[in-house]
Image (spheres, grey):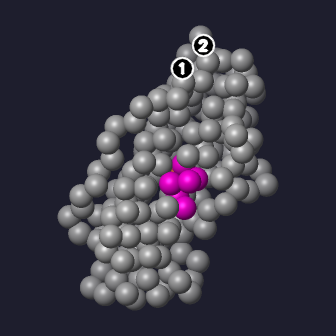
Amino acid sequence: MPRFADSLNEQIVNEFSASQQYIAIAVHYDAQTLPQLAAHFYRQAVEERNHALIIVQYLLDANEEAVVPAVEAPQTEFADVVAPVALALDQEKRVTEQIVELVKLAREEGDLVGEQFLHWFLTEQREEVASMSDLLQVVERGRANLLLVEEYMARAQVGDQGGPDAAMPPVAGGAL
Ligand SMILES: [Fe+2]
Ligand SMILES: [Fe+2]
């Protein structure tokens, strides 16, 4: 198996781990009856799950082995209300670096089809880092009264609203 396919399989782990972490954050907010924050992270979890299965579909199409992995337990306890969003922003920045490394690897191997496949992920990461930065600012500003954050989120479109876009590559089993 070429190294690029191995690295894509590692990225499947990263995307499913991100999904699991977002579910943990969603449940954390849900338990505190913060439905807007919870909904945001439930949505993000579905997106990350789609990302994992986009890579699975690519590997299936390329006749490479696609491994459905175990993931490590996510963080479920947080110091304060801002901490989960800060963690999420760190996670998105880390994933951006991982995608950049994958692009470099595809380029190194002269795999232009693989590189082109990853371009959508680069765009997606730019959006996700930007929208999570926005959400962090909102939560930091409203940390003393999270009901203001909730009300703001209900009115304004804060952060990534989710949903498949037209340029999204095919998702194994279909996008959720
Ligand atoms: Fe992702
Ligand atoms: Fe993401």
Binning the other alpha carbons within 10 Å of mark 1 as few (below 14), some (14 to 19) or many (20 upward) gives: some
**In percent of the image, x 61 and y 18: which residue is there?**
65
- 47 is within the stretch colored magenta: yes
The residue that mark 1 highlights is: 6
Residue interval drawn in magenta: 43-48
Q: Quadrant of residue 54?
A: top right
Disc 1 marks which amino acid? Asp
Q: Label 1 vs label 2: CA separation? A: 7 Å
Give residue 173's quadrant in the image: top right
Q: Residue furthest right?
A: 166
**Marks 1 and 2 close (CB-CB < 8 Å):** yes
Q: Position of residue 70 (x, y in %)?
A: 42, 31
Q: Main secondary structure of the magenta part?
A: helix
Point 31% across, 74% down: residue: 32
For badge 2, the amino acid type reads Pro
Q: Which mark is residue 2?
A: 2
